[in-house]
Image (cartoon, grey):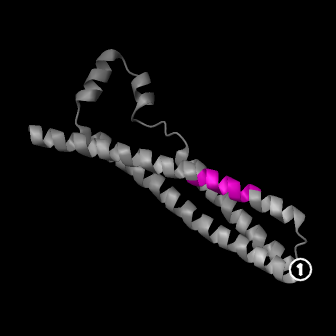
Amino acid sequence: MSATTEQSLTDAHAEVKAEIARTDTKTALLLAFVGAVLAGAWTIARDLPLSWPALVVGSSGMVLLVAAAGLLLRSTRPTLGRHGFPLWATLTPEQISEAVTRDLAVDIAGLSRLAVAKFTCLRRAVDLTLIGGALLILALVIAAGGAA
């Protein structure tokens, strides 16, 4: 394999790993945000007299936020696959040397699939968070309108 090809594979490997790290960071931030919104919405809902429409809309928003949190947790769940630490922990020193020297393309492909799966969960969770948040705001408007 040429030095240029080897460098390109090394660069691609680093890029995929960096994308996984960025996705995990975004996931952690969104999970904290969703948790704060759920806690805040629950606190507000306990103190407001809610009409049935506000209760239904608000409950729907809460369910979507819980679903978003589930997707985020699924995205951060460790994958005990064929790459990384779990693999190294099961190999002998000689097998580790062989595994490290084989083609990086296999590792890049596996990590890329992992990155896409994480990104897909994150994207769906963002969509659910937006819809759930909008429903909570609508429930608040309905509750405020009913109280006026």
Can residue 113 be seen in this snapshot?
yes
Asked if residue 54 lies left or right of residue 90, the reply is right
Predominant secondary structure in magenta?
helix
The quadrant in which the C terminus is found is bottom right
Foreground: 129 or 84? 129
Q: Which residue carries the number 1 mark?
A: 147
Residue type at mark 1? Answer: Ala
User: Which residue extends farthest front?
Assistant: 148
Residue 26 rendering spot, x and y as whole percentages: 50, 52
Q: Which residues are magenta?
A: 30-39
Can residue 114 be seen in this snapshot?
no
**Relative height, residue 8 to residue 143 (above, below):** above
**Relative height, residue 91 to residue 130 (above, below):** above
Foreground: 26 or 9? 26
Circle 1 Cα neighbour tier, 10 Å, few/some/many (<14 / 14–19 / ≥20): few
26 is within the stretch colored magenta: no
Residue 136 rendering spot, x and y as whole percentages: 72, 70
Asked if residue 134 lies left or right of residue 101, the reply is right
User: Which residue extends farthest top?
Assistant: 93
Q: Quadrant of residue 83?
A: top left
Asked if residue 116 lies left or right of residue 59, the reply is left
The quadrant in which the N terminus is found is top left
**Relative height, residue 133 to residue 92 (above, below):** below
Residue 113 rendering spot, x and y as whole percentages: 38, 50
- Name the residue located 83 percent from the left edge and 83 percent from the top edge: 145
